[in-house]
Image: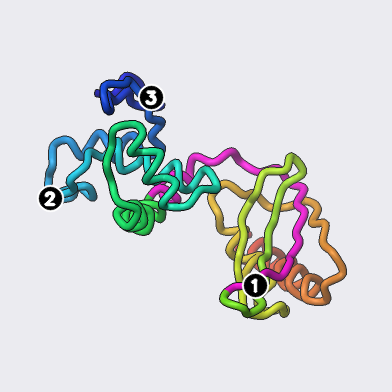
C-alpha cells in the first residue's frame, strides 16, 4: 500500500522497495478496478508497471537490461512486455506531469541540431531557460521557418512556460522570421483584448 503521495512501498521478492510513482493518483484509483482504469486486466499491479516504465524513461537502459534488473528484484517480466508498458503508459505519464512542471523563467536559449534517425537527418529543436531546465523539444524533418514557428508555438502553449523576455538563438535564418511572427501575433492579441 502507498505510504505517501510521493511513492509507494512494495514488497517484491521478499525485499521492501520504495517505488516512486509519477502517477500516484492514477495508480491509487486502479485498485478499485473500475471500467475507467488504464490498468484493468493487467497481470502486474500498477506500482510494478509504473516502476518499470519510470526506470526505462529515467535511465539510459535497454528493455533487456530492465528485464534483468526487475528479475533480480523478484519480478519476472519479459522485455517485450516492458516495451508495451512504456508505449502505453509513457504518454499518459507525460500528459499528467506537464501541469506540475516547475514554471520557466523569461530568458530562453533555443538551439537545434541534426541527428540521424533510420539513416536520415532529422532536426531536433530544443529550448531551455536560463536555469538549464528544458522547456520543450521538437523533432522535425526540415530545418526551416515553418518548423521553427511550429516549435515556438508548441513551446509557448506549454502550461509551464511563460512569455519570454529574451530569446537567445544561433544564426539560423529561420528564427528571426518565427520570432517576428510571434511578436506580431502578441501585438494583435493585446490590441483585440483591449
Q: Position of residue 183 (x, y in %)?
A: 74, 66
Up-down relation of residue 2 to residue 150 (above or below)? above
Q: Position of residue 22 (x, y in %)?
A: 41, 38
- Work out whether mark 1 precedes mark 2 in sequence or the reverse, and give the earlier one: 2
| Coordinates of residue 135 in the picture (x, y in percent) | 63, 51
Residue designated by label 2: 35
The residue that label 3 is drawn on is 18
Residue 98 belongs to magenta span: yes
Q: Which residue is mark 1?
A: 116
Q: Nearer the viewer, residue 194 or 186?
A: 186
Residue bounds of the magenta highlight: 93-117
Q: Secondary structure at mark 1?
A: strand
How much space separates mark 2 and mark 3, taking CA atoms?
28 Å
Q: Give the mark, 2 or 3, whose residue is nearer the N terminus.
A: 3
- Nearer to me, 32 or 190: 32
The secondary element bearing badge 2 is classed as loop
Give yes or no for contact between labels 2 and 3 (Cβ–Cβ under 8 Å).
no
Specify the quadrant that holds the N terminus: top left
Amino acid at each position: 500500500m502507498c505510504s505517501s503521495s510521493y511513492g509507494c512501498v512494495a514488497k517484491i521478492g521478499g525485499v521492501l522497495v520504495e517505488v516512486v510513482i509519477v502517477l500516484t493518483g492514477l495508480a491509487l484509483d486502479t485498485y478499485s478496478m473500475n471500467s475507467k482504469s488504464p490498468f484493468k486486466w493487467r497481470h502486474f499491479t500498477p506500482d510494478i508497471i509504473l516502476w518499470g516504465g519510470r526506470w526505462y524513461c529515467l535511465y539510459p537502459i535497454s528493455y533487456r537490461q530492465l528485464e534483468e534488473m526487475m528479475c533480480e528484484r523478484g519480478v519476472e517480466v519479459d522485455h517485450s512486455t516492458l516495451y508495451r508498458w512504456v508505449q502505453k503508459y509513457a504518454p499518459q505519464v507525460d500528459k499528467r506531469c506537464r501541469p506540475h512542471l516547475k514554471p520557466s523563467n523569461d530568458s530562453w536559449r533555443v538551439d537545434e541540431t541534426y541527428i540521424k534517425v533510420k539513416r536520415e537527418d532529422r532536426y531536433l529543436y530544443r529550448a531551455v531557460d536560463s536555469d538549464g531546465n528544458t522547456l520543450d523539444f521538437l523533432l522535425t524533418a526540415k530545418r526551416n521557418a515553418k518548423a521553427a514557428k511550429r516549435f515556438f508555438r508548441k513551446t509557448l502553449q506549454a502550461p509551464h512556460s511563460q512569455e519570454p523576455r529574451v530569446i537567445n538563438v544561433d544564426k539560423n535564418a529561420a528564427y528571426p522570421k518565427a520570432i517576428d511572427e510571434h511578436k506580431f501575433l502578441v501585438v494583435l492579441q493585446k490590441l483585440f483584448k483591449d
